[in-house]
Image (spheres, grey):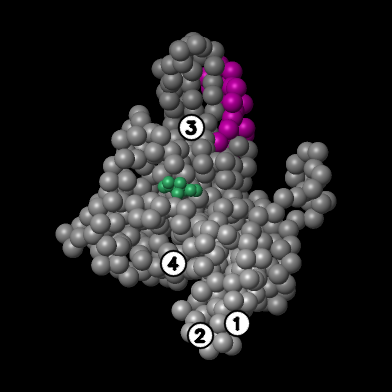
Protein backbone atom coordinates (compact mmCIF):
# COMPACT_ATOMS: atom_id res chain seq x y z
CA UNK A 1 0.00 0.00 0.00
CA UNK A 2 1.16 3.52 -0.72
CA UNK A 3 1.76 5.82 2.26
CA UNK A 4 -1.33 7.95 1.61
CA UNK A 5 -3.53 4.85 1.47
CA UNK A 6 -2.50 3.74 4.95
CA UNK A 7 -4.52 4.66 7.99
CA UNK A 8 -2.91 6.65 10.77
CA UNK A 9 -1.55 3.59 12.57
CA UNK A 10 -0.11 2.27 9.31
CA UNK A 11 1.62 5.61 8.66
CA UNK A 12 3.01 5.70 12.20
CA UNK A 13 4.32 2.16 11.73
CA UNK A 14 6.18 3.22 8.57
CA UNK A 15 7.72 6.19 10.41
CA UNK A 16 8.68 3.99 13.34
CA UNK A 17 10.51 1.63 11.06
CA UNK A 18 12.07 4.37 8.90
CA UNK A 19 13.43 6.49 11.77
CA UNK A 20 13.82 3.84 14.49
CA UNK A 21 11.26 5.66 16.62
CA UNK A 22 10.70 4.32 20.13
CA UNK A 23 7.24 3.34 21.39
CA UNK A 24 7.34 6.54 23.41
CA UNK A 25 8.11 8.61 20.27
CA UNK A 26 5.14 7.03 18.49
CA UNK A 27 2.93 7.80 21.46
CA UNK A 28 4.03 11.46 21.32
CA UNK A 29 3.05 11.59 17.64
CA UNK A 30 -0.23 9.80 18.36
CA UNK A 31 -1.11 12.30 21.06
CA UNK A 32 0.21 15.30 19.14
CA UNK A 33 2.01 16.30 22.34
CA UNK A 34 3.28 19.82 22.41
CA UNK A 35 4.76 22.10 25.01
CA UNK A 36 2.92 22.45 28.32
CA UNK A 37 1.35 25.67 29.53
CA UNK A 38 4.16 26.37 31.98
CA UNK A 39 6.61 26.37 29.12
CA UNK A 40 4.29 28.42 26.88
CA UNK A 41 3.91 30.97 29.66
CA UNK A 42 7.68 31.20 30.02
CA UNK A 43 8.13 31.67 26.26
CA UNK A 44 5.74 34.51 25.44
CA UNK A 45 3.75 37.17 27.24
CA UNK A 46 0.06 36.97 28.19
CA UNK A 47 -0.11 33.30 27.14
CA UNK A 48 -3.56 31.74 27.36
CA UNK A 49 -3.63 28.67 25.15
CA UNK A 50 -2.15 26.87 22.11
CA UNK A 51 -3.00 26.52 18.44
CA UNK A 52 -2.21 23.31 16.60
CA UNK A 53 -1.62 22.47 12.95
CA UNK A 54 -1.83 19.17 11.09
CA UNK A 55 1.51 17.41 10.64
CA UNK A 56 1.77 15.40 7.41
CA UNK A 57 4.58 13.44 5.78
CA UNK A 58 5.80 14.13 2.25
CA UNK A 59 7.13 11.04 0.53
CA UNK A 60 9.44 10.09 -2.38
CA UNK A 61 12.20 12.58 -1.56
CA UNK A 62 15.61 11.46 -2.78
CA UNK A 63 18.18 14.16 -2.05
CA UNK A 64 21.91 13.72 -2.72
CA UNK A 65 21.19 9.99 -2.97
CA UNK A 66 19.54 9.76 0.47
CA UNK A 67 15.88 8.84 1.06
CA UNK A 68 13.81 11.21 3.19
CA UNK A 69 10.36 11.22 4.70
CA UNK A 70 9.62 14.90 5.24
CA UNK A 71 7.37 16.17 8.06
CA UNK A 72 5.33 19.21 7.04
CA UNK A 73 3.10 21.27 9.32
CA UNK A 74 0.52 23.18 7.31
CA UNK A 75 -3.17 23.98 7.33
CA UNK A 76 -3.58 24.09 3.53
CA UNK A 77 -4.85 21.05 1.62
CA UNK A 78 -2.84 19.63 -1.32
CA UNK A 79 0.56 20.98 -0.21
CA UNK A 80 1.86 17.69 1.20
CA UNK A 81 0.51 15.80 -1.84
CA UNK A 82 2.09 18.35 -4.20
CA UNK A 83 5.52 18.07 -2.55
CA UNK A 84 5.33 14.27 -2.75
CA UNK A 85 4.25 14.40 -6.39
CA UNK A 86 7.14 16.72 -7.32
CA UNK A 87 9.60 14.45 -5.49
CA UNK A 88 8.18 11.38 -7.23
CA UNK A 89 8.71 12.86 -10.68
CA UNK A 90 12.18 14.18 -9.75
CA UNK A 91 13.38 10.77 -8.58
CA UNK A 92 12.90 9.35 -12.10
CA UNK A 93 16.04 11.35 -12.95
CA UNK A 94 17.87 10.68 -9.68
CA UNK A 95 16.12 13.09 -7.34
CA UNK A 96 17.48 16.38 -6.03
CA UNK A 97 21.07 17.54 -5.83
CA UNK A 98 21.50 20.11 -3.09
CA UNK A 99 24.28 22.03 -1.37
CA UNK A 100 24.21 24.43 1.55
CA UNK A 101 26.96 26.92 2.39
CA UNK A 102 28.56 26.83 5.85
CA UNK A 103 26.33 28.41 8.50
CA UNK A 104 27.77 31.92 8.41
CA UNK A 105 25.47 34.55 9.92
CA UNK A 106 25.97 38.31 9.98
CA UNK A 107 25.72 40.47 13.09
CA UNK A 108 25.52 44.26 12.82
CA UNK A 109 26.69 46.97 15.18
CA UNK A 110 25.54 50.49 14.24
CA UNK A 111 27.85 53.33 15.29
CA UNK A 112 26.81 57.01 15.19
CA UNK A 113 28.49 60.33 15.89
CA UNK A 114 31.94 59.51 14.47
CA UNK A 115 33.89 62.56 13.30
CA UNK A 116 36.39 60.84 10.98
CA UNK A 117 34.74 57.76 9.52
CA UNK A 118 37.75 56.74 7.41
CA UNK A 119 39.99 56.75 10.46
CA UNK A 120 37.40 54.85 12.52
CA UNK A 121 37.22 52.10 9.88
CA UNK A 122 41.02 51.79 9.92
CA UNK A 123 41.14 51.64 13.71
CA UNK A 124 38.36 49.06 13.97
CA UNK A 125 40.03 46.89 11.33
CA UNK A 126 43.36 47.13 13.21
CA UNK A 127 41.55 45.77 16.28
CA UNK A 128 39.83 42.98 14.36
CA UNK A 129 41.59 40.11 16.17
CA UNK A 130 40.86 41.61 19.56
CA UNK A 131 37.18 42.17 18.68
CA UNK A 132 36.85 38.62 17.34
CA UNK A 133 38.33 37.21 20.51
CA UNK A 134 35.94 39.30 22.68
CA UNK A 135 33.04 37.95 20.58
CA UNK A 136 34.30 34.37 20.80
CA UNK A 137 34.74 34.57 24.56
CA UNK A 138 30.94 34.81 24.78
CA UNK A 139 30.15 31.43 23.26
CA UNK A 140 31.28 27.83 23.16
CA UNK A 141 31.22 27.84 19.35
CA UNK A 142 34.98 28.40 19.11
CA UNK A 143 35.56 25.14 20.97
CA UNK A 144 33.52 23.41 18.28
CA UNK A 145 35.63 24.78 15.47
CA UNK A 146 33.13 27.56 14.73
CA UNK A 147 32.36 31.03 16.10
CA UNK A 148 33.19 34.59 15.00
CA UNK A 149 35.35 34.25 11.88
CA UNK A 150 35.61 37.69 10.39
CA UNK A 151 34.76 41.33 10.87
CA UNK A 152 34.21 44.08 8.33
CA UNK A 153 33.17 47.71 8.26
CA UNK A 154 30.71 49.46 6.01
CA UNK A 155 30.00 53.17 5.92
CA UNK A 156 26.41 53.75 4.90
CA UNK A 157 24.92 57.04 3.84
CA UNK A 158 21.36 57.33 5.07
CA UNK A 159 19.02 59.87 3.49
CA UNK A 160 17.65 61.25 6.71
CA UNK A 161 20.36 60.85 9.36
CA UNK A 162 23.64 61.16 7.51
CA UNK A 163 26.56 58.73 7.46
CA UNK A 164 27.02 55.87 9.93
CA UNK A 165 29.53 53.13 10.52
CA UNK A 166 28.23 49.59 10.51
CA UNK A 167 30.58 46.99 11.95
CA UNK A 168 29.64 43.50 10.82
CA UNK A 169 30.62 40.25 12.48
CA UNK A 170 30.63 37.07 10.40
CA UNK A 171 29.98 34.09 12.61
CA UNK A 172 29.88 30.38 11.85
CA UNK A 173 26.96 29.24 14.01
CA UNK A 174 27.25 25.56 12.95
CA UNK A 175 23.95 23.79 13.61
CA UNK A 176 22.16 26.63 15.37
CA UNK A 177 19.92 29.19 13.73
CA UNK A 178 22.23 31.59 15.50
CA UNK A 179 20.13 34.60 16.55
CA UNK A 180 20.98 34.43 20.25
CA UNK A 181 24.68 33.89 19.88
CA UNK A 182 25.02 36.63 17.27
CA UNK A 183 23.11 39.15 19.37
CA UNK A 184 25.22 38.31 22.42
CA UNK A 185 28.43 38.69 20.41
CA UNK A 186 27.32 42.04 18.93
CA UNK A 187 26.50 43.34 22.39
CA UNK A 188 29.82 42.10 23.74
CA UNK A 189 31.97 44.01 21.23
CA UNK A 190 29.94 47.23 21.36
CA UNK A 191 31.77 48.92 24.31
CA UNK A 192 35.17 48.27 22.71
CA UNK A 193 33.92 49.62 19.37
CA UNK A 194 32.78 52.78 21.14
CA UNK A 195 36.18 53.24 22.75
CA UNK A 196 38.01 52.62 19.45
CA UNK A 197 35.83 54.99 17.39
CA UNK A 198 34.74 57.55 19.98
CA UNK A 199 31.31 57.00 18.50
CA UNK A 200 28.05 55.88 20.04
CA UNK A 201 26.72 52.38 19.40
CA UNK A 202 23.00 52.02 18.79
CA UNK A 203 21.75 48.74 17.29
CA UNK A 204 23.52 45.44 18.05
CA UNK A 205 21.60 42.74 16.25
CA UNK A 206 21.88 39.88 13.74
CA UNK A 207 20.88 40.38 10.13
CA UNK A 208 18.11 38.07 8.94
CA UNK A 209 19.45 38.54 5.43
CA UNK A 210 21.71 35.48 5.64
CA UNK A 211 23.41 35.87 2.25
CA UNK A 212 26.43 33.82 3.34
CA UNK A 213 24.14 30.94 4.23
CA UNK A 214 22.73 30.12 0.81
CA UNK A 215 21.30 26.77 -0.20
CA UNK A 216 20.88 25.52 -3.74
CA UNK A 217 18.94 22.55 -5.05
CA UNK A 218 18.35 21.30 -8.54
CA UNK A 219 16.37 18.48 -10.15
CA UNK A 220 15.37 17.16 -13.56
CA UNK A 221 11.75 16.38 -14.32
CA UNK A 222 11.50 13.76 -17.06
CA UNK A 223 9.96 14.90 -20.33
CA UNK A 224 8.07 11.62 -20.86
CA UNK A 225 6.47 11.94 -17.43
CA UNK A 226 5.69 15.65 -17.51
CA UNK A 227 4.70 15.80 -21.17
CA UNK A 228 5.93 18.30 -23.75
CA UNK A 229 2.91 20.56 -23.41
CA UNK A 230 3.30 20.81 -19.65
CA UNK A 231 7.06 21.42 -19.92
CA UNK A 232 6.39 24.29 -22.32
CA UNK A 233 3.55 25.50 -20.11
CA UNK A 234 5.79 25.56 -17.05
CA UNK A 235 8.39 27.58 -18.96
CA UNK A 236 5.64 30.05 -19.92
CA UNK A 237 4.45 30.18 -16.31
CA UNK A 238 8.02 30.85 -15.16
CA UNK A 239 8.40 33.63 -17.75
CA UNK A 240 5.15 35.14 -16.47
CA UNK A 241 6.50 35.13 -12.90
CA UNK A 242 9.81 36.66 -13.95
CA UNK A 243 8.06 39.44 -15.86
CA UNK A 244 5.25 40.28 -13.47
CA UNK A 245 5.52 40.91 -9.75
CA UNK A 246 1.81 40.14 -9.15
CA UNK A 247 2.36 36.62 -10.45
CA UNK A 248 5.84 36.28 -8.95
CA UNK A 249 4.68 36.83 -5.39
CA UNK A 250 2.18 33.97 -5.79
CA UNK A 251 4.80 31.80 -7.50
CA UNK A 252 7.20 32.34 -4.58
CA UNK A 253 4.37 31.86 -2.09
CA UNK A 254 3.97 28.37 -3.55
CA UNK A 255 7.70 27.73 -3.02
CA UNK A 256 7.37 28.93 0.58
CA UNK A 257 4.37 26.62 1.11
CA UNK A 258 6.89 23.79 1.13
CA UNK A 259 9.75 25.51 2.91
CA UNK A 260 7.69 27.00 5.72
CA UNK A 261 5.77 23.76 6.30
CA UNK A 262 9.07 21.96 7.03
CA UNK A 263 10.23 24.96 9.05
CA UNK A 264 7.11 24.82 11.20
CA UNK A 265 7.38 21.07 11.67
CA UNK A 266 10.93 21.53 12.96
CA UNK A 267 10.15 24.72 14.97
CA UNK A 268 12.30 27.15 12.99
CA UNK A 269 11.98 30.93 12.99
CA UNK A 270 9.64 31.11 10.01
CA UNK A 271 9.56 34.94 9.96
CA UNK A 272 13.34 35.07 9.56
CA UNK A 273 13.15 32.58 6.69
CA UNK A 274 10.37 34.49 4.90
CA UNK A 275 12.00 37.91 5.35
CA UNK A 276 15.36 36.62 4.08
CA UNK A 277 13.85 34.74 1.14
CA UNK A 278 11.85 37.68 -0.17
CA UNK A 279 14.77 40.09 0.21
CA UNK A 280 16.87 37.59 -1.75
CA UNK A 281 14.20 37.52 -4.45
CA UNK A 282 14.88 41.28 -4.81
CA UNK A 283 18.66 41.05 -4.88
CA UNK A 284 18.93 42.40 -8.44
CA UNK A 285 16.74 45.38 -7.68
CA UNK A 286 13.46 43.82 -8.72
CA UNK A 287 11.38 41.04 -7.21
CA UNK A 288 12.05 37.77 -9.05
CA UNK A 289 11.49 34.05 -8.83
CA UNK A 290 13.32 32.01 -6.19
CA UNK A 291 13.32 29.14 -8.67
CA UNK A 292 14.69 28.92 -12.18
CA UNK A 293 13.28 26.70 -14.95
CA UNK A 294 14.74 25.64 -18.28
CA UNK A 295 14.78 22.71 -20.70
CA UNK A 296 17.85 20.59 -21.33
CA UNK A 297 18.97 18.98 -24.60
CA UNK A 298 16.91 15.81 -23.81
CA UNK A 299 13.81 17.94 -23.46
CA UNK A 300 13.65 17.34 -19.69
CA UNK A 301 12.52 20.18 -17.49
CA UNK A 302 15.33 21.40 -15.24
CA UNK A 303 14.47 23.25 -12.05
CA UNK A 304 16.73 24.96 -9.55
CA UNK A 305 16.29 27.04 -6.44
CA UNK A 306 18.62 29.29 -4.45
CA UNK A 307 17.84 31.18 -1.28
CA UNK A 308 19.29 32.00 2.14
CA UNK A 309 18.09 29.59 4.84
CA UNK A 310 18.99 30.26 8.46
CA UNK A 311 17.79 27.08 10.13
CA UNK A 312 18.97 25.15 13.15
CA UNK A 313 18.94 21.57 14.36
CA UNK A 314 20.06 22.49 17.87
CA UNK A 315 18.93 25.16 20.30
CA UNK A 316 15.62 26.93 20.68
CA UNK A 317 12.43 24.95 20.31
CA UNK A 318 13.94 22.54 17.79
CA UNK A 319 15.25 20.30 20.53
CA UNK A 320 12.68 21.01 23.24
CA UNK A 321 9.36 20.81 21.38
CA UNK A 322 8.47 17.10 21.35
CA UNK A 323 7.05 17.13 17.81
CA UNK A 324 9.86 19.29 16.40
CA UNK A 325 12.40 16.92 17.94
CA UNK A 326 10.62 13.98 16.34
CA UNK A 327 10.32 15.77 13.00
CA UNK A 328 14.11 16.09 13.00
CA UNK A 329 14.42 12.44 13.98
CA UNK A 330 12.12 11.42 11.12
CA UNK A 331 14.14 13.58 8.72
CA UNK A 332 17.34 11.90 9.93
CA UNK A 333 19.31 15.07 9.19
CA UNK A 334 22.72 15.32 10.77
CA UNK A 335 23.24 19.06 10.46
CA UNK A 336 21.53 22.37 9.87
CA UNK A 337 23.06 22.40 6.39
CA UNK A 338 21.46 19.07 5.56
CA UNK A 339 18.11 20.37 6.83
CA UNK A 340 18.49 23.41 4.55
CA UNK A 341 19.11 21.07 1.60
CA UNK A 342 15.87 19.21 2.36
CA UNK A 343 13.90 22.43 2.72
CA UNK A 344 15.18 23.87 -0.57
CA UNK A 345 14.34 20.59 -2.35
CA UNK A 346 10.82 20.65 -0.90
CA UNK A 347 10.42 24.26 -2.10
CA UNK A 348 11.46 23.26 -5.61
CA UNK A 349 9.20 20.18 -5.64
CA UNK A 350 6.32 22.34 -4.47
CA UNK A 351 6.89 24.91 -7.20
CA UNK A 352 7.06 22.17 -9.85
CA UNK A 353 3.75 20.65 -8.75
CA UNK A 354 1.96 23.99 -8.45
CA UNK A 355 3.04 25.01 -11.97
CA UNK A 356 2.25 21.54 -13.35
CA UNK A 357 -1.27 21.70 -11.95
CA UNK A 358 -1.77 25.31 -13.03
CA UNK A 359 -0.77 24.71 -16.66
CA UNK A 360 -2.96 21.62 -16.93
CA UNK A 361 -6.34 21.28 -15.27
CA UNK A 362 -5.92 24.16 -12.79
CA UNK A 363 -5.38 24.03 -9.08
CA UNK A 364 -8.97 23.46 -7.93
CA UNK A 365 -9.55 20.07 -9.55
CA UNK A 366 -6.71 18.50 -7.57
CA UNK A 367 -7.93 20.13 -4.35
CA UNK A 368 -11.38 18.72 -5.00
CA UNK A 369 -10.12 15.21 -5.75
CA UNK A 370 -8.09 15.14 -2.54
CA UNK A 371 -10.95 16.56 -0.54
CA UNK A 372 -13.36 14.04 -2.06
CA UNK A 373 -11.00 11.19 -1.18
CA UNK A 374 -10.77 12.33 2.42
CA UNK A 375 -14.54 12.68 2.71
CA UNK A 376 -15.01 9.21 1.18
CA UNK A 377 -12.57 7.79 3.74
CA UNK A 378 -14.42 9.55 6.54
CA UNK A 379 -17.60 7.93 5.31
CA UNK A 380 -15.87 4.56 5.66
CA UNK A 381 -15.11 3.75 2.00
CA UNK A 382 -12.12 1.46 1.40
CA UNK A 383 -10.26 -0.23 -1.48
CA UNK A 384 -11.96 -0.04 -4.92
CA UNK A 385 -15.00 1.46 -3.29
CA UNK A 386 -12.87 4.39 -2.09
CA UNK A 387 -11.76 5.31 -5.62
CA UNK A 388 -15.30 4.99 -6.97
CA UNK A 389 -16.90 7.06 -4.21
CA UNK A 390 -14.22 9.78 -4.34
CA UNK A 391 -14.50 10.02 -8.10
CA UNK A 392 -18.31 10.38 -7.97
CA UNK A 393 -18.20 12.90 -5.13
CA UNK A 394 -15.81 15.12 -7.12
CA UNK A 395 -17.71 14.64 -10.39
CA UNK A 396 -21.08 15.37 -8.85
CA UNK A 397 -19.71 18.38 -6.95
CA UNK A 398 -21.45 17.40 -3.72
CA UNK A 399 -18.58 16.49 -1.41
CA UNK A 400 -20.23 15.59 1.87
CA UNK A 401 -20.01 12.56 4.13
CA UNK A 402 -23.77 12.12 3.77
CA UNK A 403 -23.57 11.96 -0.02
CA UNK A 404 -20.58 9.61 0.21
CA UNK A 405 -22.65 7.22 2.35
CA UNK A 406 -25.49 7.42 -0.14
CA UNK A 407 -23.13 6.54 -3.02
CA UNK A 408 -21.71 3.66 -0.97
CA UNK A 409 -25.21 2.31 -0.44
CA UNK A 410 -25.95 2.55 -4.16
CA UNK A 411 -22.71 0.72 -5.03
CA UNK A 412 -23.37 -2.00 -2.44
CA UNK A 413 -26.90 -2.33 -3.81
CA UNK A 414 -25.59 -2.57 -7.40
CA UNK A 415 -23.10 -5.24 -6.35
CA UNK A 416 -25.77 -7.29 -4.60
CA UNK A 417 -27.95 -6.88 -7.72
CA UNK A 418 -25.10 -8.31 -9.77
CA UNK A 419 -24.26 -5.04 -11.58
CA UNK A 420 -20.60 -4.34 -12.13
CA UNK A 421 -18.78 -1.62 -10.26
CA UNK A 422 -17.04 0.68 -12.71
C1 LIG B 1 -1.29 28.09 -3.30
O1 LIG B 1 -1.06 28.04 -1.91
C2 LIG B 1 0.02 28.18 -4.03
C3 LIG B 1 -0.11 28.47 -5.53
O2 LIG B 1 -0.92 29.61 -5.72
C4 LIG B 1 1.28 28.68 -6.07
C5 LIG B 1 1.32 29.16 -7.49
O3 LIG B 1 0.34 29.80 -7.96
O4 LIG B 1 2.37 28.95 -8.13
C6 LIG B 1 -0.80 27.32 -6.24
In percent of width and height, residue 195 lies at 58, 21
Quadrant of residue 153 within the rendered picture: top left
The residue to which callout 2 is attached is: 419
In percent of width and height, residue 295 lies at 22, 55
Tell me if label 1 and label 4 are in contact, CB under 8 Å.
no
Disc 2 to disc 4, how far (Cα)?
Answer: 42 Å
In percent of width and height, residue 185 lies at 59, 38
Q: In the rendered view, does 83 fall on the left or right side of 11?
A: left
Disc 1 to disc 3, how far (Cα)?
Answer: 74 Å
Quadrant of residue 190 within the rendered picture: top right
Residue at position x 79%, y 51% in the image: 39
Question: Of residues 10 and 185, which is closer to you in this image?
Answer: 10
Tell me if label 1 and label 3 are in contact, CB under 8 Å.
no
The residue to which callout 3 is attached is: 168
The stretch of residues the image draws in magenta is: 185-206
Q: Earlier in the sequence, mark 1 or mark 3?
A: 3
Q: Earlier in the sequence, mark 3 or mark 4?
A: 4
The residue to which callout 4 is attached is: 61
Mark whose residue sits in front, 2 or 3: 2
Residue 217 visible, this orientation: no
Assign a secondary structure to mark 3.
Answer: strand
Mark whose residue sits in front, 1 or 4: 1
Q: In the rendered view, does 145 fall on the left or right side of 227?
A: right
Q: Earlier in the sequence, mark 1 or mark 2?
A: 1
Q: Is the residue marked 4 within 8 Å of ligand 1, measured from its CB?
A: no
The residue to which callout 1 is attached is: 413
Q: Is the residue marked 1 within 8 Å of ligand 1, measured from its CB?
A: no
Amino acid sequence: MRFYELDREGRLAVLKDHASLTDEDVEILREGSGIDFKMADSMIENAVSFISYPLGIATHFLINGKEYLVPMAIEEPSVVAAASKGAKVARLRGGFTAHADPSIMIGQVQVKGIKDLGRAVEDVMKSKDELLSIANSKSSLARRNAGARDLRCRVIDTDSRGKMLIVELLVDVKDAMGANVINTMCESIAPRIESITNGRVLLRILSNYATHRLVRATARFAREEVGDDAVEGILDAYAFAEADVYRCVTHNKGVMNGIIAVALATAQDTRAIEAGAHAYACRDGRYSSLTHWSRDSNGDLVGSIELPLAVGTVGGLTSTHPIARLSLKILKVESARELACVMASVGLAQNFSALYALVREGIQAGHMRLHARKVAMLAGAEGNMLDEVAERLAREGNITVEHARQIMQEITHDISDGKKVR
